[in-house]
Image: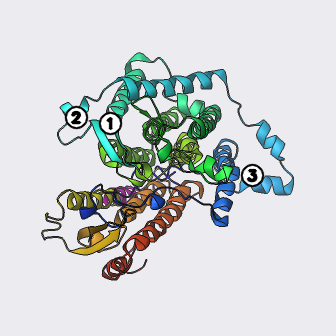
Amino acid sequence: MKPLGKRLEGPMAAKSQSNDPKTESPGSISKAATHGQWGRAWEVDWFSLASVTFLLLFAPFIVYYFIMACDQYSCSLTAPLVDIATGRARLSDIWAKTPPVTTKAAQIYVAWVTFQVLLYVLLPDFCHKFLPGYVGGVQEGAMTPAGIVNKYEINGLQAWLITHLLWFANSYLLACFSPTIIFDNWIPLLWCANILGYAVSTFAMIKGYFFPTDARDCKFTGNFLYNYMMGVEFNPRIGEWFDFKLFFNGRPGIVAWTLINLSFAAKQQELYGHVTNSMVLVNVLQAIYVLDFFWNETWYLKTIDICHDHFGWYLGWGDCVWLPYLYTLQGLYLVYHPVQLPTRYSLGVLLLGLLGYYIFRMANHQKDLFRRTDGRCVIWGRKPRVIECSFTSANEQKHRSKLLVSGFWGMARHFNYTGDLMGSLAYCLACGGGHLLPYFYIIYMAILLTHRCLRDEHRCANKYGRDWERYTAAVPYRLLPGIF
């Protein structure tokens, strides 16, 4: 899942998709791809149905379990199970100790989402006018299966900057609310996030059936659960500019990510009188991830998240609940278990995180440069090597394409994912080795990105046939050169 990895797969794990069939990168699908290949499935096999049912039933429980374990058991994942198994506690006892939704939390959450909607809809981007190299303002997305090219107001970086400037102004000057407000209301806010996640997912389902933005971009199966989870509409919109997919993928969860970490750091300061270097590492490394997403938001319009996913519970609930609550477990853990790392260890974690980010960003830059220039560029000081290939679109027309086998893309077929995993591991290592809980993220991302590799390659093998076999022979490894 994406934001269950944003990023629901996070915005760093996304594969770029080309609009020009002549300059495709490995794993992408051009605008000439067949309608049947695009997006989620038309039919549901037993494995997909089982997976959907499992996630609908247990994903909310998984989030609750992690947050409850920190609140009641000091982040131990085994202690609640041991207490229940030995009779020291009952499920009703654990539930009774769980804070309910409160009026204050509801007011905070409504104000937060409303503020992000207003920043998204009413404030045109001005950052692109004075930030060199930043691409914002009105931009076009990829062509949909129905042949629609949607326009987007790219103003996420602006929304992030305004939000954080107000946060710091409040923390150091205005004092309208405590900087620990998010941590202090963390579980009540969880119920609010669930309400919004289920509400927007249900609304999107109803909208897809009865008043879709474009009926040609809808997909239906005979299974209600699959339609609800994976979505019916490709690009549900209200009016000309409010795009459900871009808003919930990019706001409010990802904008909140760095605020949540700052609130955790403030709570650590309040409880212990100082902020540990591990908390600083988590805040810095994850802030780099978030800022990269917003700086490259226009590029994000050409990723799998926007170009292939329909909008359903998978994205709606996942972006509201899974992303902000499970992607921030490292900071939450460090509130309960402040870790002061040895200097050499902390420098090693920092270097691992920065190296992972560098690999991820440069790999995607190489692919984007190759695509934009039709291969007429230099990668690592040389003209890039390519695999010439062809495919047939739904209208029986032949198309030519190129697959990049130079630079990082000559080392592994998904080397950008390798950089992503290195960064994910750094977040976890910053928490030391005392508990399993903060390592959930790297375990989850490893499963997620491996699945994405296999899914992308299945699509490409069907599309390119023998040409894909030539490509995999030239670049035999998926993620780890010499290993996998």
Mark pair 1, 2: CA separation? 9 Å
Q: Earlier in the sequence, mark 1 or mark 2?
A: 2
Give the residue at mark 2. 128
Check the image and report above or below for 477 versus 286.
Answer: below
Number of the front mark, 1 or 3 = 1
Question: How are the residues colored?
Answer: rainbow
Q: Residues within 10 Å of mark 1 (few under 14, many from 20)?
A: many
- In the drawing, does residue 337 fall left or right of residue 262? right
Check the image and report above or below for 169 versus 77.
Answer: above
- In the drawing, does residue 382 fall left or right of residue 316? left
Mark pair 3, 2: CA separation? 50 Å
In the picture, the quarter occupied by the C terminus is bottom left
Judged from the image, the secondary structure of the residue bearing numbered disc 1 is strand
Residue drawn at x 40%, y 49% as measured from the top left:
144
Residue drawn at x 36%, y 79% as measured from the top left:
472
The spot of residue 175 in percent (x, y) is: 45, 18
Please give the label number shown on residue 154: 1
Q: Earlier in the sequence, mark 3 or mark 2?
A: 3
Check the image and report above or below for 132 versus 306.
Answer: above
Q: Earlier in the sequence, mark 1 or mark 3?
A: 3
In which quarter of the view is residue 204 placed? top right
Number of the front mark, 1 or 2 = 1
Amino acid found under the numbered disc labelled 3:
Pro
Instruction: Tell whether position 350 is magenta.
Output: yes
- Residue contact between numbered discs 3 and 2, judged by CB atoms under 8 Å: no
- Residue contact between numbered discs 1 and 2, judged by CB atoms under 8 Å: yes
Range of magenta residues:
342-355
Number of the front mark, 3 or 2 = 2
- In the drawing, does residue 81 fall left or right of residue 188? right
Give the residue at mark 3. 80
Mark pair 1, 3: CA separation? 44 Å
In which quarter of the view is residue 413 placed? bottom left
